[in-house]
Amino acid sequence: MAMPPKPRRDDLAAMLHPLLRDLVAAELPILAAHDISMWGYVVLNALDRSPVRTQTALAEAIGADKTRIIGTLDELQQAGYIERRPDPDDRRVRLLEITPAGRAVKNAVQSDIQHGEERWLAELTAEERRVFLRVLERLTRAETT
Amino acid sequence: MAMPPKPRRDDLAAMLHPLLRDLVAAELPILAAHDISMWGYVVLNALDRSPVRTQTALAEAIGADKTRIIGTLDELQQAGYIERRPDPDDRRVRLLEITPAGRAVKNAVQSDIQHGEERWLAELTAEERRVFLRVLERLTRAETT
DNA sequence: TATTGTTATACTCTATAACTATA
DNA sequence: TATAGTTATAGAGTATAACAATA
């Protein structure tokens, strides 16, 4: 007897790609309203977790090239959102730290973004939401491994 | 009395971005082994769901520019993975359809990719896995809305 | 005149390589 | 000589605009 075709699911990347694209599209106007770039936001997030001793280390932490974040760091510094001072012990390196103003703007942007993301999360039950976010945090942290 | 700092979670995009980057990095060698491009794989996935009447419609369905997929369609057609023939009723449009060979290669690639993604999914409990995949499918489908 | 598919051009983003200043 | 940061150059990817064929 003929078997029904087995239900194939899409792979993770195939599902995540369009989802992320829409999430990012929703972020852009929010970032623009706060006058901050996507990379700027990523950097503030990284520095909010912990200060970092070199720009190269920061670039690696966020999966970017060291040459790619220089412009971003210039902007953030000029806006007063980060501190960037030469290490007295090795004047080649720049110690990077988020400022209170930087943390404030980062939190404001984050709140707005998360508010917008309710559009997606609202479709989930309380349990789905809980599991989904927990899994996502776990999988994202596993990256660094 | 001092309140403990409220635990802020990252926004969805901030979590999904590095995750997707690693998933895509894991896909690339698999796609290369099957001699197919990322966009080619995306197109085969879309055409496997249902044939499409115009290239513009296909481009929109996968969130790409209509000019961007032409080279991809050329390659897929030459490889015998899709059919692309003028509509007799309107000879401006090209009817697009996946071939058995195209479906075969798409399924082979998909199997390999999903096998590789077990590296991530294996960290989840059976229930987490079930909920996570279900939610993902739901959120991804909601895109088109 | 409007639309489908195509080609050509310009622009953005990213990576590679060269440079400086410290060590 | 090796490394951190920077700047300059080149390449890939993408979008915009112009074009040919058909309606």
Image: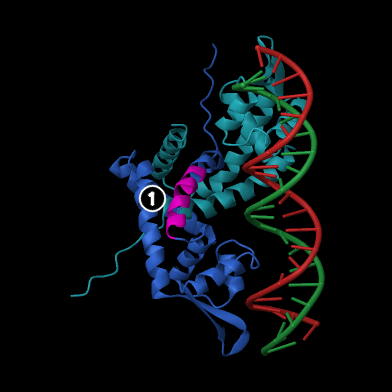
Chain colours: A blue, B cyan, C green, D red
Residue A25 belongs to the span the image colors magenta: yes
Residue under label 1, please give it.
Answer: A133
Label 1 neighbour load within 10 Å: few <14, some 14-19, many 20+: some
Does residue A141 sit above or below D23 in this rendering? below
B115 and D19: which is toward the camera: D19
Asked if A34 appears above or below A47 in the picture, the reply is above
Q: Which residues are magenta?
A: A21-34
Q: At which x and y percent is residue A7?
A: 51, 26
Question: Can you give x and y, in whole percent of width and height, for residue A127 in the image?
Answer: 30, 43
Q: Does residue B74 appear to the left or right of A28 in the view shown?
A: right
Query: Residue at 41% across / 57% down in the picture?
Result: B10
Q: Secondary structure at mark 1?
A: helix
Residue B107 visible in the shown view: no
Q: Is residue A55 in the magenta section?
A: no
Dominant secondary-structure state across the stretch colored magenta: helix
Return the residue found at the far left.
B1
In the rendered image, the quadrant that contains the C terminus of chain A is: bottom right
Q: Is residue A133 above or below residue A120?
A: below
Chain ID at mark 1: A
Residue at 40% x, 69% y: name it.
A103
Given residues B117 and A28, the one toward you in this image is A28
Q: Amino acid at mark 1?
A: Leu
Q: Residue at position x 47%, y 37% from top?
A: B140
Could you tell me which quadrant the N terminus of chain A lies in?
A: top right
Image check: A21 left or right of B134?
right
Q: Residue furthest top?
A: B89
In the image, residue B24 above or below residue B64: below
